[in-house]
Image (cartoon, rainbow, N blue to C red):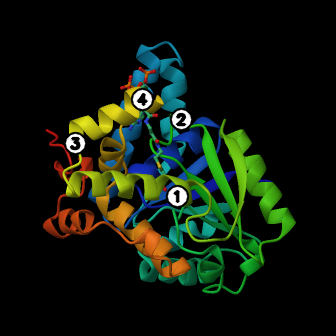
Amino acid sequence: MSIKTFGVIGAGQMGNGIAQVAAVSGLDVIMNDIKTEFVEKGKANIEKNLSRNVEKGRMTGEEANAVLSRIKTSIVLTDLKGADFVVEAATENEKLKLKIFQDLDEICPSQVILATNTSSIPIGRIAGATARPELVIGMHFMNPVPVMKLVEVIKGLATSQETFKTTWDLSLKFGKTPAEANDFPGFIANRILMPMINEAVFCLYQNVGTCEDIDTVMKLGMNHPMGPLALADLIGLDTCLAIMETLYDGFKDSKYRPCPLLRKYVETGWLGKKSGRGFYQYN
Ligand code: CAA
């Protein structure tokens, strides 16, 4: 299947990163969100990343301009009718994602693959919102998308081998290394990562250590590039909580219960880097 135009739903931290890597790989990109200010902010972030690449000599100014010119912004979902492959990277909210997939199923030609960047919602459930479950797949990028090498490619029960192969090859085209996972709550990445982050929040909650000490232990003791609490702030505490809820609901196992302190932070609007305050404070 030839893919020339790539659609991204969501221009937030994941969506604009995905749009960037797709455009750098040579595809025309439609980056969609619900408000002009969201798509403009997403595009400004891409411009900032590309300028840095030019400064660092990784690409020329002309190449950066060419990449930018391949990214069209959109605030109307029907613009996606021209896309050959769509990845949804909207907020991690099941109701919202199901509605987007229902709409995309009506808008996009019947052969178009509809991928989701969900971090934990079952692929089968999302596929069930469409009349093309064999063309629905998980394409899970890591944050920050331009830097992180992994794409977790998740097959739902009904996902066809052809859909899987196309998504796998597209990940390679984006310069990423794909890894295959099956459709269980949290897949591989978040099944392992999120309980670690949640446990770090429990350590803070029970005053086992301060934020700084918890992060120092994991950074210097385990060689993690950043501590779990700083990483939670980067991911977004609302997303971390949503993933823990999915693991807890999916397995009905108390070991996945979200730490009450994590919930309290989210309820207070302390969502991490994006809101200016999480476990740490940001300017
Ligand atoms: N966007 C684009 N580029 C970024 C970036 C961003 N948001 N953040 C950092 N970078 C770039 C920097 O510009 C820098 O590039 P240069 O080579 O041009 O200097 C490079 O990355 C390294 O950054 P820094 O020197 O500032 O800092 P660092 O060496 O500590 O790296 C990091 C930063 C890449 C974020 C690193 O700390 C790291 O790998 N952290 C762990 C990230 C991680 O675990 N991500 C997965 C989260 S889980 C997830 O995403 C899935 C989910 O479903 C929740």
Q: Which amino acid type corresponds to the residue marked 2 in the rendered image?
A: Val
Residue at 60% from the left image edge and 47% from the top image edge: 28
Q: Is residue 117 above or below residue 45?
A: below
Residue 110 location, quadrant = bottom right
- The reply to whether the residue tagged 4 has its Cβ within 8 angstroms of ligand 1 is no
Give the structural element (helix, strand or loop) at label 4. Answer: helix
Q: Give the x, y percent position of residue 62.
A: 51, 22
Q: Nearer the viewer, residue 10 or 157?
A: 157
Mark 2 or 4: in front is: 4
Q: Spatial distance from mark 1 to mark 2, Cα to Cα?
A: 31 Å
Q: Spatial distance from mark 4 to mark 3, Cα to Cα?
A: 15 Å
Q: Earlier in the sequence, mark 2 or mark 4?
A: 2
Disc 2 crowd, CA 10 A, few/some/many (<14, 14-19, 20+): many
Image quarter where the N terminus lies is bottom right
User: Disc 4 marks which residue?
Assistant: 221
Q: Spatial distance from mark 3 to mark 2, Cα to Cα?
A: 39 Å
Q: Earlier in the sequence, mark 4 or mark 3?
A: 3
User: Disc 3 marks which residue?
Assistant: 211
On the rendered structure, is 177 left or right of 219?
right
Mark 1 or 4: in front is: 4
